Image (tube, grey):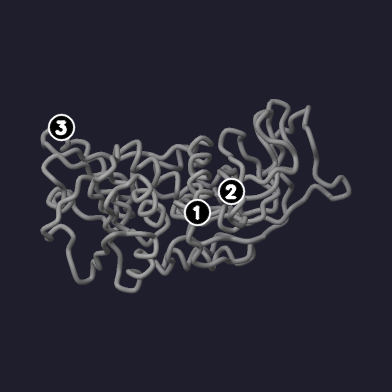
Amino acid sequence: MANRVERDEELVGAVDPADDGMMRAVVQKRYGDADVLHLARISRPGIKVDEVLVRVHAAGLDRGTWHLMTGRPYVMRLVLGLRRPKNPVSGLDLAGTVVAVGSGVTRFQVGEEVFGFGKGSFAEYAAAKENKLARKPANISFEQAAVVPVSAVTALQGLRDAGHIQPGQKVLITGASGGVGSYAVQLAKAFDAEVTGVCSTAKTDVVRSFGADHVIDYTREDFAKGTQHYDLILDCAGNPTLPRLRQALTTTGTAVIAGGEHGGNITGMSRQLRALALSPFVHQRLTMFASTQRGTDLEQLADLIESGKVMPYLDKTFPLERVAEAMRYLEAGKARGKVGITL
């Protein structure tokens, strides 16, 4: 099976030896829309010395899984597989229980509850590198924990690492009702910033519930034409032009472009690249970033969740066999916060 990898000879712990080594998983044999996703029975993955095997209780759905499904922008295929996915199992986010560990793993033991980044999480079992996991916060469910990793880490790195957020700053979050935006609003508040969220009319209430100090309904008001100017903009959605972002910034403000689905099919980053080219010639700082999967960031997020400063907002869950339907729900822009997959 394509999903099987070489097993570590010194595997510690094991799943039930009476089973047949197979599992249910959502797979795709080619790139395309949600119709390429289907449920299949395949061999359970093996793990390497620095990996753990997780019995998946829940998985998260995000725009990253959409990109993996479609193979767009096309530059991603240089890594994912030119004609078809190298790993046919979909999914990145997961939460579950460790059932086996590689001989080099020191941070986790069999039986521990974890969350983080896996290799094909839309399955009953998934392999994950030790340094891309953290212990699940005790005060949230597996379903909530599963929708944290990709979106919350992106929001954290966008604000902290790329945006250099400081207490007291005025921060604007576009796409504030979405996956990344829902965490960005809460994290910016945790960093003691004054936060304005941008969203549609139907989602203003949920953005306020995230803790936003102000909410802009983009169907009625253009954030770039208001009297308020922002020290930091985290642009998660909407694809505002660079002139509009600059118009909304203070004279020395920073705009971090974290998303945008209209950056071209080749690189997907045309607007980001224009921002980087322009930034050296203006007083404002225009930048972008690519999020990195790090267990240390998951640990920081777990602390914030356990303290109550950040909480996953789970809009809707779908069972494993309805992943294609969940993807269509995400594509339609209906989600408020995050969408989860349950096993």
Q: Quadrant of residue 166?
A: top left
Name the secondary structure under disc 2: loop
Q: Quadrant of the N terminus?
A: top right
Taking the view exactly as shown, the residue that stands out farthest to the bottom is: 202
Residues at circles 1 and 3 in contact by the CB criterion of under 8 Å: no
Query: Residue beneath label 1, please?
Result: 69
Q: Give the x, y percent position of residue 338.
A: 47, 60
Q: Residues within 10 Å of mark 3 (few under 14, many from 20)?
A: few
Residue type, label 2: Pro
Q: Quadrant of residue 283?
A: top left
Residues at circles 2 and 1 in contact by the CB criterion of under 8 Å: no
Q: CA distance from mark 1 to mark 3?
A: 36 Å
Q: Which mark is residue 280?
A: 3
Residue at 34% in and 39% down: 289
Query: Residue beneath label 2, please?
Result: 137
Q: Give the x, y percent position of residue 171.
A: 25, 50
Q: Which mark is residue 252?
A: none
Residue type, label 1: Met
Quick check: 56 left or right of 83? right
Q: Quadrant of the C terminus?
A: bottom right
Q: Nearer the viewer, residue 170 or 79?
A: 170
Q: Is residue 145 in sight in this rendering?
A: yes
Q: Nearer the viewer, residue 334 or 197?
A: 197
Q: Residues within 10 Å of mark 2 (few under 14, many from 20)?
A: many
**Image vertical order of residue 141 relative to residue 290, above or below:** below
